[in-house]
Amino acid sequence: MEGKRMYIRSIVLKENARELCDSYLFDIPAIRGLETLDLQSPVTFFVGENGSGKSTLLEAVAVAYGFNPEGGSKNFAFSSNPTHSGLYQALRLVKGPVRPRDGFFLRAESFYNVATEVERLEEIGGPGLFDSFGGKSLHQQSHGESFLSLAIHRFWGKGVYLIDEPEAALSPSRQLTFLARMGELVRDGSQFLIVTHSPILMAYPGADILLFGEDGIRRVKYEETEHYRITKAFLESPQRMLRELLRGEEE
């Protein structure tokens, strides 16, 4: 077992950041307040409300690290709709002493484009590429199946994996399968940065949970997250919560 390893140790906003990227990004408190964000665990979750800057920062880290903005490995060079922000130019990544042997950036909104690029590479490079993606085209698998195929067959270990909202593709049981695969990869010396709303995923033992909010970015415990508290309250008394939520309709 290779053990825990950090390929990205810190995310630093350059002093002249406002000169290097779009000014609107600094309307986001998490970006505006960013100075140095130290990563303390091989599994880091970015959590918070929609629009809080989680995906924006993850995308910028991915591009600053050398990944294609739309997803894939560093070898993926396709571009279907270049809409990524310029924030990556304002970031400096503090890296660990060991380089990863593998890496992948995956975002739910452009997964179709990644799957299409895999098909194109299979066609021009000859048969064999699909073996790393479950043995067949990702387009011939359901969204959840194709995502797990990536995690099981294409994530080779000793790598850095940046993933945006994996729960969009996964049922609760498949989220547990993904958690188990994450554990295998972490034990094999991998690092994950994940944007998520899933209380199942963010329960990963020892994970670093970073909450993006109006006061910037701060560390929280799992039980302090709104995701955990609301889900717990609902499951403990769904009928009571539904009565409260639907009271206006009944009146």
Image (tube, grey):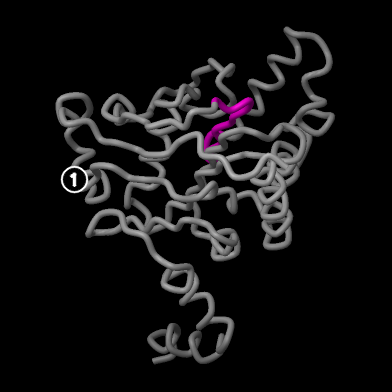
Which residues, given as a range, are shown in magenta? 99-110
Residue type indicated by callout 1: Asp
- Name the foreground residue: 192 vs 118: 192
Magenta span has 234?
A: no
Q: Residue at x 59, y 62 (%)?
A: 205
Q: Position of residue 96 (x, y in %)?
A: 47, 32
- Name the foreground residue: 92 vs 110: 92
Q: Residue at x 72, y 32 (%)?
A: 154
* Kind of element beneath mark 1: helix
Judge from the rendering whether residue 136 lies leftward or rightward of residue 90; answer left or right: right
| Displayed quadrant of residue 135 | top right
Q: Position of residue 44 (x, y in %)?
A: 48, 50
Q: Which residue position is annotated with label 1?
A: 27
In the rendered picture of this protein, how many numbered marks are placed on residues?
A: 1
Judge from the rendering whether residue 94 lies leftward or rightward of residue 32; answer left or right: right
Q: Position of residue 172 (x, y in %)?
A: 68, 62
- Name the foreground residue: 175 vs 221: 221
Q: Is residue 194 above or below residue 172?
A: above
Q: Position of residue 59 (x, y in %)?
A: 42, 35
The N terminus lies in which quarter of the figure? top right
Q: Residue at x 73, y 7 (%)?
A: 124
| Displayed quadrant of residue 158 | top right
Q: Residue at x 56, y 40 (%)?
A: 5
The C terminus lies in which quarter of the figure? bottom left
